[in-house]
Amino acid sequence: MRMSKLVAKTIKETPRDSELPSHKFMLRGGFMRQFAAGIYGILPLGMRCISKIEKICREEMESVEGQEVRLPCASPKDIWEETGRYQTFGKDMMKFKDRHEKQMVLNPTHEEPVVYLARTEITSYRQLPVMMYQIQTKFRDEPRPRGGLIRLREFTMKDAYSFHTNEDDLKQYYDKMYSAYNRFYKRTGCKNFVSVMSDNGLFGGKYSHEFQMLVPTGEDKLITCPKCKYAANEEISTSPYVINCNESELALNKVHTPNIKTIEMLSKHLEVSPDKTAKAVMFQTLSNVPVIAFVRGDLEVIDKKVRTLVQSEVVPASHDAIVRAGGVAGSTGPIGLNLKNCIVILDHTVVKSRNLVVGANEKDFHFVNFNADRDLLSQVSDREKIIIGDIAAAREGDPCPNCSHSLATTRGIEIGNIFHLGTKYSEGMNCTYLDQNGKKQYPIMGCYGIGITRLLPAIIEESHDERGPIFPLPVSPFEVHFCVLNKKEQNIFNTSEEIYKNLCDQKIQVLIDDRDEKPGSQFADADLIGIPFRIILSPKTFAENCVELKYRDNRAETRKVKIDDIVKVLVQEIEDEYKKYC
């Protein structure tokens, strides 16, 4: 490929609003262009990278007996109503009406469409197990698209769905897919990635893992244990248990707390530490049911843990929702709430702690010495409206839930996930098969996703310097970047064309810079495009019958190679480099 013919040019200045290095480099390098918030067009350089990622992905899916399908980007509202997710998915789901006033959905994921297909095509146990996969566009109306291709409203995913007759069969396949994912990420050049326990959320199921690229710019906070290798997304990490469980219960007492609005102010006013208080964090479901979550005052609530417990998306509560629940802004507490109108969640730290300070649901008043069993749980008859669970965030230094060693934190970009789905969708959509006895059974499902468009910027986040990306060879847009300096000299031009032809004849993917640009500009663009191998033909090297061979990752010093030898040398270098990713 000739740079003079390449669609999209490099940009010298850093575009406004480019946040992450990958965002900046992909815009400046001509890999993509923005159309709207969270919506990008992928240009030829970007497409070459993504096509290579897709090729490796297909090979790994075929290795676990996957069958490729292509499900539609849009589907009718009806199939989403069968599982209830038309209502629970929330505002992320993009909806529209066709010309016949039929309500449609731009698919944010494809569990419902694939089960719709499976219930007509899978009818017998003899067809199971089976896995279908696709590489397809998804749509989610993200409230805050960010980071270029990291968080989009329109994006490409590989999603796979397996169907099984029993749990053991699913678990075996889940483990097989887990291994395939590890191979895939290694083959695409990911170096520092891990799998962690993750939130099943609205997907349902018993267990799940997500694959995270460990980079400082990652949007996800991960909790890890250096000793026992416990690793989890903060969204499901187990928060610490309390240390003051053995205190004697003291008498409940209401105290005046004028103009106290925060835990910090409350602690100072009553001269207690934050871990001797409980705070209320207020949400509401999409059907406007108030959800009041109580957590110890020194901890933070994880919204997704709340969502999982109530099995609905939640948003911050409106003033009306707080009033309907019986709460008072700044003084909301667990005693005296209107349980007929709301759901109450008590974090396990609140239940196990003794003598906490809580709001009194009365302006400028709090209770001291609140004990959950005595003052709430034993006093109410409507216990089903009170959920006890883990909704707090684990913190660095907290004891590991497995071995009690101090936990550490790091950041990552989610690049894939695998879920146990169970029969949530097959039951919800009445997808059945006939077993050996001719009886109808619901297939047990697994779900496996890879963020195809997200993986490219994640790789750049992991591997770059101040000048641009440093691509791993398997996903680089080209294998060799050929800089020709002073090509107006006929001998240099002729030699460059001969080298270019010989490289192409050896099936080496070459990007030749045949533009009339100064050397500094050519080198800057080569750094910005990030191809692993670079050769340079200049008047100086031509006079020595050589070219310079340079490595984008600076693994070795720039060296001179005889013009007659460069093709052979590059063939061997490229072959050796690919072996590192097997």
Image: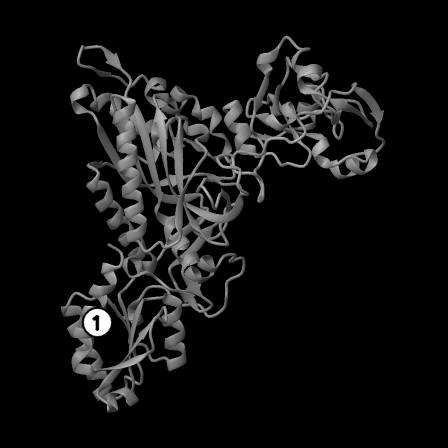
Q: Is residue 220 above or below residue 339?
A: below
Residue 125 in which image quadrant:
top left
Q: Quadrant of residue 85?
A: top left
Residue highlighted by disc 1: 570
Q: Position of residue 341 (x, y in %)?
A: 64, 15
* Front residue of 404 and 123: 404
351 horizontally vs 573: left or right? right
Q: Pinpoint residue 557: horizontal percent, then vertical percent.
A: 34, 77
Residue kind at label 1, given as amino acid type: Leu
Disc 1 crowd rating (10 Å Cα; few below 14, some 14-19, many 20+) is many
Task: Give the residue at x 24% y 60%.
Answer: 578
- On screen, residue 295 above or below 14: above
Find residue 399 and report its image quarter.
top right
| Residue 119 in sight | yes
Residue 428, percent from left and from top? 36, 19
Residue at the image point whose x is 70% and y is 17% from the top: 337
Q: Quadrant of the C terminus?
A: bottom left
Residue at x-position 32% and y-position 75%: 550
Please identify the residue farthest to the bottom as the structure is shown.
543
In the image, residue 198 sits, relative to residue 193, either above or below, namely: above
Compare residues 84 and 569 and report the one nearer the observer: 569
Q: How many marks?
A: 1
Image spot of residue 130 (x, y percent): 21, 29
**Quadrant location of the N terminus?**
bottom left
Q: Nearer the viewer, residue 268 or 45?
A: 268
Viewed as shown, does residue 498 lie left or right of 321?
left
With 486 as the anchor, is 373 left or right in this view? right
